[in-house]
Amino acid sequence: MKTLSITAALAAVLAASTSAIAVAEPVFNRVASFAVADSLPAETDRKTPTSSEIITASEDGNTLVYSDSPLKAIGFIDITDAKAPKAGGIVSFEGEPTSVAAVGGKVLAAVNTRESFTKPSGFLAAVDLASKNIDVKCDLGGQPDSVAISKDKTLAAIAIENERDEDVNDGQIPQMPAGDLVIVSLKDGLPDCGTLKHVTLTGLAEVAGDDPEPEFVAFNSKNEIALTLQENNHIVIIDGNTATVTGHFSAGTADLTGIDTQKDGALSFTDDVAGVKREPDAVKWLDDDRIVIANEGDYEGGSRGFTIFDKAGKVLFESGSSFEHAVAKLGHYPDKRNSKGIEPEGLEAATFGEDKLFFVLAERASVVGVYKDTGAEPELLQILPSGVSPEGAVAIPGRNLLATANEVDLVEDGGARSHVMIYERAEGTAAYPQIVSAEKDGVPIGFGALSGLAAIKDEPGKLLAVSDSVYSSQPRIFKIDATQKPAVITDALTITRDGAPAQKLDIEGIVADGEGFWLASEGNSDKLYAHALLQVDAKGKIKKEVAIPEELRANEIRYGFEGITSVGEGDDQTLWMAVQREWKDDEKGFVKLVSYKPASEEWGAVRYPLEATAEGWVGLSEITVHGDRAYIIERDNLIGNAAKLKKIYSVALADLKPAKLGGELPVVKKEEVSDLIPELKSLGGYVVDKVEGFAVDSAGNGYVVTDNDGVDGSSGETLFFSIGTMDAM
C-alpha cells in the first residue's frame, strides 16, 4: 500500500497553480455556471427549491441531464455553447429521481416512489432526449439509488438501497427490507423490463450483512460491476452478464494524521485518528482491474479521502489526509461540518488526450480534486471550485469538458441556488485558487472568512488580513504575500487575551500602527459580542479594548464596524471605522463613518450616503486610506444574478471632518472608483455576496478579498485579486 505524503500533496497543488511552466500544460478552468432554478417552468414560483444531484451527458456531449429530487423531475441543459448554457426544460415524475444515465438517444432515470422506509418502491424510466417523452417504465421492487450503463450499452445496473430510517433505533442497522442490485438488458437505449434480474447481496458484509444498503454502481469494459455498500463498509464485484457475485471485500479502515476533528471555531490540523472505517460512496473503475472509491462515510466512518483497490480487494493506494490538507490550503475546510471533514462523495474518471484522469468531489468543501492516474501513486493536478456541495460529475472528453452537479439550494436563506458548473480543459494556467496558505509546523495554515485587509508599510505586495467570528476560538491576523500568484498566506498570528486565544470577537477590520495593530470588532448582543476597538501588539496580545461610547451604544444593531483605517500619527492619529448598516438613529439610506482619536479618546462621525436597492439591503464592508482619499466598499447582500452592487467608492480626506456624536452629522460626498462585479464573474461562477476586504499596498496597488463564511452555507471560494494602481483612478 502506498500513502501520498502530506508534503507531496501540498506541493502538487501549489505546483499546479504557481509554477512557471516552460511548456503550457492543459488545465481545467470553469467557463460557465447554470442555476438549475432557471429550468423551472414559467408558471412555477422562482423560489421553489431545486437541486442538481447526479448528472450525465448525451453521447454527442451537447446536452446535460441532472436529477432534481425536490422538484420530482429531471432537468436538461443545452451546452452546445458550453460558455453559454441554456435551460432545456424538465420532465416530471410521480416520485423522486435519484440518478440518471444517458445511453443512445435516451436517458435512464431511477425514481424513488416509496410509501415509507419499510415499504420501499421505485421504477426505472427511459426518457427520449429529443421528445422528452417517457418511453418505458420498469418496476424495480425497491428504492433505487444510482444507475450505470455498461460500456457496450447492453446492460443497466441499478443499486436498490432501501435506505435506513435515521430516526429509528438511532439509525442503527439492520433495518429491513434489505437492498439488492437490479440488472436489466438494453436495446437501443431502452430497458427490456422482462429481463430484469435481482442480485442478492445478503450474507456478504461483516457489518449488518443481512441488511446490505447498496450505494453506487459502475461498469468496467468486461461488464463487471463494482458496487459499494456504504453503511456496510463493503464492496462487491458482480458479473453483469450472469448477474452473479464474483467477489467481495471489506472497504477496511484508514489511519489519519494531522486532521481537525473538532467543531470548535478553530482550524487546528493536529489530531491523529486510527482505524476509521472508509464507508465508500461513489466508485469508478480506473481500468478493468482497479477501482477508486470516495470515502464519505454515512454511518460510523468516513476516512476523508479516497482509496484505490484492485478488484480482489488489495489496497493499492490510500490518500490518507493528503487531499484534505490540499483543500485546507485553499481555505475550503468546513470546520462547522467537521465530523467527517471534507466528505469526498462523488467520483468521475475519463481519459483526456493521453491523460487518464479521475475527479474527486468533496461535498462539504465544495471542490473537485483533479488527479492523474499514473498506475501507481496518483498525481494531484488541480483543485477546482464548485458550487455548494458537489454531488455528481460527468466528463465529456470529446469536447474537453467536465460538469459538476451541486445539490444544495439555499434559496430559503437568500443564498446561492443549486448550480451546474462547467469546466473546459485547454492550454493555459489555472485561474483558481487566487489565494492559498503555506505550511506551518508541517500542516496547512487554516484560513477562511477573510473579512478585512490592510497594507504593510514599505513592503509592496505584502498585506494583512483578519478572519471573522466564524473562527471564534481562533481569532487570527494573517500575513499575505501578494507578489506570488496565487497569493500566499505565509503566517498567522493568534489574537490573545490573558495568554489564551481571545473570545467573543468578530474581527472585521485591521490597520497597522507601527508597533502593532488596531482591530475593529463587530458586535452582536445576541451572542454577547460587543462593538469595540482593540489595540494589539506585534505578538497578537490585546493591549487595550475600547468600547463604543453611550451615544453609539444606545442605538446599536448587530451590523457594526466593517473596517478600520488610520489617518495621522502620534497624538494626531485618528481611526476611522465604517458602520455597515443604518443604526436606529440613522436616516434611511445613510450610515456613519465613525472616528476615534486614541490620544484624546474623542469620538465623532460623518454621514455616508448609500446607493438605493430594489431588493435586499446595501451596506459598507471596508474602509482604507491611500493618499488624500478614503476608499470604501459598498455592496448589496445579494448573490448570483440578483447581485447588482459591489463597488468601491472614495471620499476625500478633506471631507472627513467629524462632528460630535448625538448632534447633526455632516454628509460626505462620494465618487465611484471601481465596479467589482465583472471581476467577480471572471472565474465563471456566480457572483458572491460578501466582498469584504480592500487595501492599497505601499506601491499604490489595490487588492480585494471576499469572505467565504468559513464554507458554511457557501461554496467556500475566496476571491483575491488586484484592481491595479489606485494612483490612476
Image: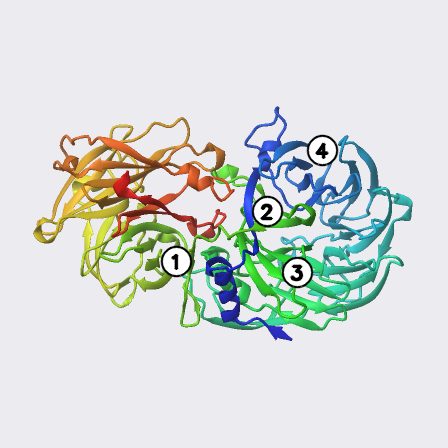
Q: Residue at x 52, y 64 (%)?
A: 12
Q: Position of residue 196 (x, y in %)?
A: 87, 49
- Is residue 427 at all visible to an observer of this figure? yes
Query: Which of the marked residues, 2 or 4, is nearer the chain's N terminus?
Result: 4
Q: Residues within 10 Å of mark 4 (few under 14, many from 20)?
A: some
Q: Residue at x 68, y 58 (%)?
A: 354
Contact flag, marks 1 and 3 (Cβ < 8 Å): no
Q: CA distance from mark 1 to mark 2?
A: 25 Å
Q: In the structure shown, which secondary structural element does the residue marked by tag 3 occupy?
A: loop
Q: Which residue is mark 2?
A: 424
Q: CA distance from mark 2 to mark 4?
A: 28 Å
Q: Which residue is mark 1?
A: 484
Task: Nearest to the eye among marks 4 and 3: give it.
Answer: 4
Q: Position of residue 463 (x, y in %)?
A: 30, 55
- Amino acid type, label 4: Val
Q: In the structure shown, which secondary structural element does the residue marked by tag 1 occupy?
A: loop
Q: Which residue is mark 3?
A: 172
Query: Which of the marked residues, 3 or 2, is nearer the chain's N terminus?
Result: 3
User: For residue 91, which numbered disc appears in the image?
Assistant: 4
Task: Nearest to the eye among marks 2 and 4: give it.
Answer: 2
Q: CA distance from mark 1 to mark 4?
A: 48 Å
**Quadrant of the image containing the C terminus:** top left
